[in-house]
C-alpha cells in the first residue's frame, strides 16, 4: 500500500527539530531509524501529518555507554 499524504522536515539543529514537532502538533512523529513507523504507515496503521527526520541533527547519532550508564 501507499501511505497517506504527510509533510516531511529534516532540521539541522535540535532547536529546529523541537520547533517542528511543536508546530506539527500531536500528529507529528520523529523519524530516527531502527523502528517500524514506515511499515505501519504503508499499512495505514499510522498516519502522521508530519515526519521530523533527526538524521541531520548533530549529537543524535547514537547512544554511548559511559561508566556503565547510557
Image (cartoon, grey):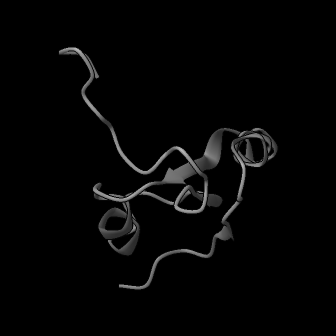
Q: Nearest the camera: 38 or 56?
A: 56
Query: Which residue sits at x=27%, y=22%?
Result: 66
Q: Position of residue 36 (x, y in %)?
A: 28, 58
Query: Which residue sits at x=69%, y=42%?
Result: 14
Query: Which residue sits at x=30%, y=69%?
Result: 39
Q: Is residue 6 above or below residue 69?
A: below
Q: Position of residue 55 (x, y in %)?
A: 52, 61
Query: Which residue sits at x=33%, y=63%?
Result: 40
Q: Is residue 39 above or below residue 69?
A: below
Q: Nearest the camera: 32 or 38?
A: 32
Q: Nearest the camera: 35 or 16?
A: 16
Give the image quarter of residue 4: bottom right
Residue 49 left/right relative to 70: right
Image quarter where the C terminus lies is top left
Image quarter where the N terminus lies is bottom left
Residue 58 left/right relative to 70: right
Toward the front, the furthest residue is: 67
Q: Position of residue 2 (x, y in %)?
A: 43, 85
Q: Is residue 69 above or below residue 22?
A: above
Residue 44 left/right relative to 36: right
Residue 8 left/right relative to 23: left
Q: Position of residue 5 (x, y in %)?
A: 62, 76
Amino acid at each position: 500500500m501507499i501511505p497517506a499524504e504527510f509533510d516531511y522536515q529534516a532540521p539541522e539543529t535540535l532547536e529546529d527539530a523541537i520547533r517542528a514537532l511543536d508546530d506539527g502538533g500531536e500528529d507529528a512523529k520523529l523519524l530516527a531509524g531502527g523502528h517500524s513507523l514506515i511499515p505501519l504507515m504503508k499499512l495505514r496503521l499510522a498516519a502522521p501529518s508530519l515526519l521530523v527526520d533527526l538524521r541531520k541533527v548533530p549529537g543524535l547519532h547514537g547512544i554511548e555507554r559511559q561508566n556503565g550508564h547510557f
